[in-house]
Every structure is written in structure tokens, then in C-alpha cells.
Image (cartoon, helix red, strand yellow):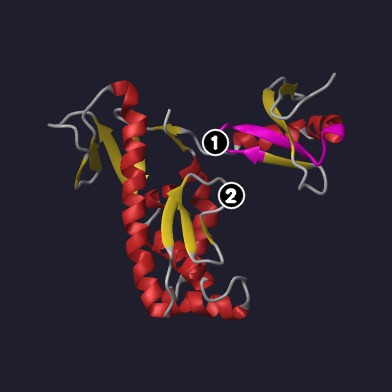
Amino acid sequence: MIIDKGDKMALVTKTGETVNVRLEVNPKARRLILRLDERKREAVAVAPSKRKIGEAAAFARDRVDWIAEHLQALPQTIHLKEGAQFMLRGEPCKISLDGPGRTPRLEIGPPLVLRVPGLADTTGQRVERYLRKSAKSDLSDAVIRYCDQLGVEARRVTVKDTRSRWGSCTSDGRLAFSWRLVMAPNEVLEYVAAHECAHLLEMNHSPAFWAHVATCRPDWKAERAWLRKYGRDLHAVQTG
């Protein structure tokens, strides 16, 4: 059987549970890799070449119980729909379709209420647009402050839906962030902004780099720890 990139297979654990595994080829991979796609709640078996895709499948098959255990440990998915509650800047926020006009409006709580009048079947997309816009605003403000503090300049700030990184910095000064940071406590978003601004001075994680981060965020270790502990919760929020 030939298994091409993007194909899937279903594996059964010793207890009869079924888990999905996506098979991919990545020429940059130096070995067989098994990771979790937390948003799709499935495993990904990566082979360095198409010739080794069968080995990747066997690699996942031998570890099916490990896959099931880690998928079960993922936080419950939250769908952005009417009545759902998610976290916004670290505070509970409820989605409502009630309200005048078509412009999303945030009411101060507790809990916060995000009013997004419109069709129910587009609620997720409209809430995500609001969150992306809010994240861009919060992150842009933070970047301006930390760039001033460090004496550097960012060329551009964008927000994306990244999977493995909360932020990134290019050598020409372009900063990119996950829009999901707007759901975290504000100090966590501030830490990631300061982290990427520090990369404008040091494109590494040397002691000098962390000294720049500490200049901006003295409690950066606690803020980073929060992200490592609860970051999965941010990825559990889904548009659909």
C-alpha cells in the first residue's frame, strides 16, 4: 500500500479506543517524528522521505497507547458559538448574539459579554475576527512600548494562527504573533511582545537576550511558565 502525504489511518488501542494519525512527509526532518496536532486532536507521524512513510506509520502504530493517553489529556474544546464562554485577556467572556447593529461590542462583566449580532452559523468567524483585531491592537501597543524601552524599531507587526510558536522575529524586523495571546492574561501577552522585541537586539537566547527581556518584564519567568502550563487551553478554542 502506498501512503501519500496527508493520508490518515485509524489505530485501535488495547482498550478498544480509536485514534487518528495523519501521515506526512517532510524532507527537512532528519528522523521519524511523532507529534500531536492539538487543534485537530490527532497524531501526526512525519517521515523524512516518501520511501520511509511506511516506517512512520509503524512508528505510530507501536505508540498508539501513548498517543491515546496524551490526546485524552488535552483540554476540552471550546467552540466559539452563541452562549459559549472563553477567556479574553484572562477573564471569562460569554458570547451573545443579542444587541443592535452589526458591530461587535464588549460589555464589562463579570463575566465579560461579547455581543456579536448576526447569523448564528457565522458566529465563530466573526468572534475570531474580533479577537484577531484586538490581539493586533494589544500587541502593537506593547511592541511600541518595548521597542522604545530597548531602543529598537520593529518594521511590522502581524497576527497569525500559529501552531508551534507564540511569536517570531525576522532579521529585518518583522514581528509575528499568535492572535490567541489575546485570550491569555495581559501580562503573558506583554511577555511575548517583550520577548520578540528583545530579538531585535539578539537573534538568539543568550544571557544577553534574557537580560533585555528582564529589562522589560522582570517577572518574565512566571509569565513564560503560565504560557507553558496553559498554552494548550488557548489552542483548544475553535472557530467551528
Mark 2 Cα within 10 Å, few/some/many (few <14, many 20+)?
few
Q: Residue 39 carries which label?
A: 1
Location of residue 86 with respect to 19 vertically, above or below? below
Residue 235 image point, x, y percent: 50, 42
Residue 105's image quarter?
Answer: top left
Helix or strand or loop: what does disc 2 sit on? loop
Give the residues in magenta: 36-51
* In this rendering, position of residue 204 left or right of residue 217: right
Q: How many labels does the image show?
A: 2
Q: Which mark is residue 53?
A: none
Q: Residue at x 65, y 39 (%)?
A: 36
Report if residue 34 lies within the magenta region. Answer: no
Front residue of this view, candidates 34 and 91: 34
Please name the amino acid that badge 1 sits on: Arg
The image position of residue 178, as x and y in percent, is 46, 50
Q: Residue at x 14, y 32 (%)?
A: 101
Mark before the other along the chain sequence, 2 or 1: 1
- Check residue 41 for magenta coloring: yes
**Other residues around mark 1 within 10 Å, as few (<14) / some (14–19) / many (≥20):** some
In the image, is 33 to the left or to the right of 146? right
Mark 2 to mark 1 CA distance (whole Å): 11 Å
Q: In this view, does 18 lie to the left or right of 86?
A: right
Q: Which residue is drawn at 56% across and 53% down?
A: 165
Can residue 55 be seen? no
Q: In this view, does 98 lie to the left or right of 72?
A: left
Per the image, the residue denoted by label 2 is 164
The one of 11 and 139 positioned closer to us in this rendering: 139
The location of residue 19, given as percent across then percent down, is: 68, 26
Cβ–Cβ below 8 Å for labels 2 and 1?
A: no
| SS category of the residue bearing label 1 | loop
Tell me if residue 195 can be seen: yes
In the rendered view, would you say 131 is above or below 158? above
